[in-house]
Image (cartoon, rainbow, N blue to C red):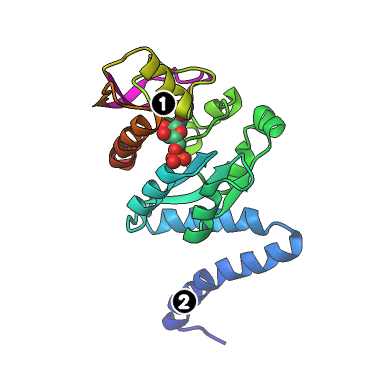
Amino acid sequence: MEKNWAFWLVYPLFLTILWPFSVIFVSFFTGQFRFFKGYLARVGAKLMGGKKVHVAIFASGAGSNARKIIEYFEKNDRIKVSLIVCNVPGAGVLDIAKEKGIPTLLINKTEFASTGYVTSLRNAEIHFIVLAGFLWKVPAVLVKAFAPGVENSKGIINIHPALLPKYGGKGMYGAHVHEAVIAAGEKQSGITIHWVNEHYDEGAIIFQAKCTVETSDTPITLAHKIHALEHAHFAPTIEGLLK
Ligand code: GAR
């Protein structure tokens, strides 16, 4: 039977629409669902001209910074917090992820040190990693895999509750930092947002903001001031980096 011009117009269109469904269908039976889902998402993003940046937040504790970042980007159609990575079962940040319907990845120290969970992060199509109160050292394998430009990665950043290069390094986290700042009689403290390299708190500084330290301040009152600075500046700084 001879096909007219309408057939040749509609038939390819029909195949194009049907094709993603058949790929997903076949992938179920070949155990390749995750792979093809990612593949289709990438093709779809290319075709639609979409360039969504998927962010993973790594956190070990309460997650107040994670919450601020998630809420800041909730209505952003280009930047999305797609994964919460946590190393502490029962940490508050996991409740926040649940409340917000964001997938989580609970990680184990040995595997983190050896693989950096690079495969899981690639499968989740993460482009950018934000450490928000994450207390393990980031292994070189992860730093390298997420260096800006490597497979669409945009880098890894960290927030530190002091004015680096002072009061950084191993063991310098949370209240320990504020205790050290007060014990040294500092008149100022603040926050530092910096790129992550293989060494604790040593990557290039992106942003700093300061607050005063009064003689009446305790580690608790100073922590409040620092959290206020973090909540005000972390998400906008991320937005600026991902422009
Ligand atoms: C934040 O103050 C962050 O700067 C600090 O942990 C806190 C986490 O608070 N990070 C470090 O000390 C890293 N060295 P949060 O869980 O409420 O976001």
Could you say where residue 50 lies in the image, as x and y percent from the top left?
38, 54
Q: Residue at x 48, y 42 (%)?
A: 57
Q: From where the camera sits, is residue 129 visible?
A: no
| Snapshot quadrant of residue 207 | top left
Query: Label 2, on which residue?
Result: 8
Q: Relative to 160, does residue 65 appear above or below in the rendering?
A: below
In the picture as drawn, the residue positioned furthest to the right comes out as 30
Query: Disc 2 and disc 1: Cα gap in Å?
Result: 53 Å
| Residue toward you, 28 or 185 | 185
Q: What amino acid is labelled 2 in the image?
A: Trp
Q: At numbered mark 1, what does the secondary structure look like: helix, strand or loop? A: strand
| Residue toward you, 98 or 179 | 179
Query: Label 1, on which residue?
Result: 195
Q: Quadrant of the C terminus?
A: top left
Q: Residues within 10 Å of mark 1 (few under 14, many from 20)?
A: many
**Which residues make up the magenta segment?**
188-210
Q: Magenta region's main secondary structure? A: strand
| Residue toward you, 15 or 29 | 29
Q: What amino acid is labelled 1 in the image?
A: Trp
Q: Residue at x 62, y 57 (%)?
A: 36
| First-in-chain label (2 vs 1) | 2
Badge nearest the viewer, 2 or 1: 1
